[in-house]
Image (cartoon, helix red, strand yellow):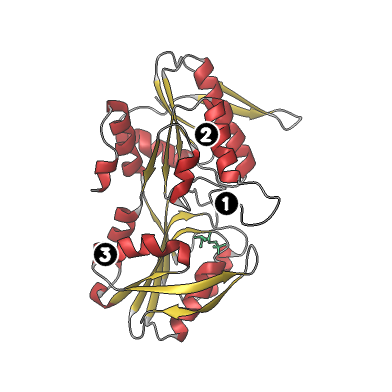
Amino acid sequence: MIFSGQSNVPLAQEIADNLGVPLGKSTTERFANDCLFVRYEQSLREGDVFIIQSLTPPVQDHLVELLMMIDAAKSSSAARVTAVIPYYAYARSDKKDAPRISITARLVADLIQTAGADRVLTMTLHSAQVHGFFKIPVDHLSAEPVIANYFATRVENLENAVIVAPDAGDLKRASALARRLALPLAFIDKQRLSDTEVTSRGLVGNVKGRTALIIDDEVSTAGTLVQAVDVLKQNGAEAVYAAFTHGVYVGPAIERIEKSPILEVAATNTCLYKGQPSPKLQTLSVGPLFAEAIWRTHRGESVSSLFT
Ligand code: R5P
């Protein structure tokens, strides 16, 4: 049984269509006092229930709705409940890197488990160790095959390209993609100044005369992206493309992308884009990948072998 929270119904519908099952019926309402109300409109007894909810803005609403849906499914006698979280917000709060702060990625994991989830299915966590905050099984999908296919089909003269990690946190991901596409790797030494501003201390690697292909887990305000594009252009890159698993696109993101000399920005549909269409933005679908992972989970088959 596939149900959707309100954050990304088109992705949930795509997953259900790929599985050949109807999207389950549920209602979410908001009381006058701002509290949410969730109710399933069909029996869940002994069902293998998958609840799809991306933790996109408004993050707190979507998180609480997910927790309520898990709780209601458990108390409606579902046999098993899997929280399918294509975009896991708070994943960047994964360590105590300042005094007196919350490791919120762990707190969110605690909440999901306390609500009663038996499993989690997610994609491209900001840092893989967030996986370890859960005591229940987590299947951590990768958008790498989808992104590799985008670059391979979209970029002319791919053999003249270079994969770029826009910060240290992306090096492993970028290196894996570079190996998959048999391309060299470059890396930008990024320093974050604030939530929306970043600066760079330079580039490691050679991009001169090449097409630079940036890969990152998410684009949020696009500060990291436009800074990386500037550095790449200053170092002689001929053209720049970027691909992200999560296109969160908040605040000045779209304006920054429009003004930047970047040719195209692609992101998967883990996050529903509600902004104005832009010729620079491409959406890549991960619906079939989630559907296959759900099917395999339901049948008790290996999910990791999807990526080998
Ligand atoms: C940070 O380490 C992440 O990998 C992304 O680079 C970051 O979330 C992007 O945020 P923004 O688009 O706001 O620079």
Mark 1 lies on residue? 95
10 Å crowding of disc 3: few (<14), some (14-19), many (20+): few
Q: What residue do we see at 66% from left, 57% from top? A: 98
10 Å crowding of disc 2: few (<14), some (14-19), many (20+): many
Q: Quadrant of residue 59?
A: top right
Question: Would residue 69 be seen by someone viewing this image from the given angle?
Answer: no
Q: Nearer the viewer, residue 33 or 127?
A: 127
Q: Is residue 8 above or below residue 3?
A: below
Mark 2 lies on residue? 5
In this picture, residue 83 sits left or right of residue 291: right
**Circles 2, 1 touching at the beta carbon (< 8 Å):** no
**Earlier residue among tags 2 and 1:** 2
In this picture, residue 12 sits left or right of residue 99: left
Per the image, label 2 sits on a secondary structure element best described as: loop
Q: Quadrant of residue 157?
A: bottom left
The amino acid on which the numbered mark 3 sits, given as a three-letter code, is Arg
Q: Position of residue 41 (x, y in %)?
A: 51, 19
Marks 3, 1: nearer the viewer? 1
Q: Position of residue 94 (x, y in %)?
A: 55, 50
Q: Is residue 300 above or below residue 249?
A: above
In this picture, residue 127 sits left or right of residue 159: right
Residue 179 numbered tag = 3
**Earlier residue among tags 3 and 2:** 2
Q: Position of residue 225 (x, y in %)?
A: 50, 69
Count of numbered labels shown in the rendering: 3
Mark-to-mark CA distance, 3 and 1:
29 Å
Q: Quadrant of the N terminus?
A: top left
Per the image, label 1 sits on a secondary structure element best described as: loop
Mark-to-mark CA distance, 3 and 2:
37 Å
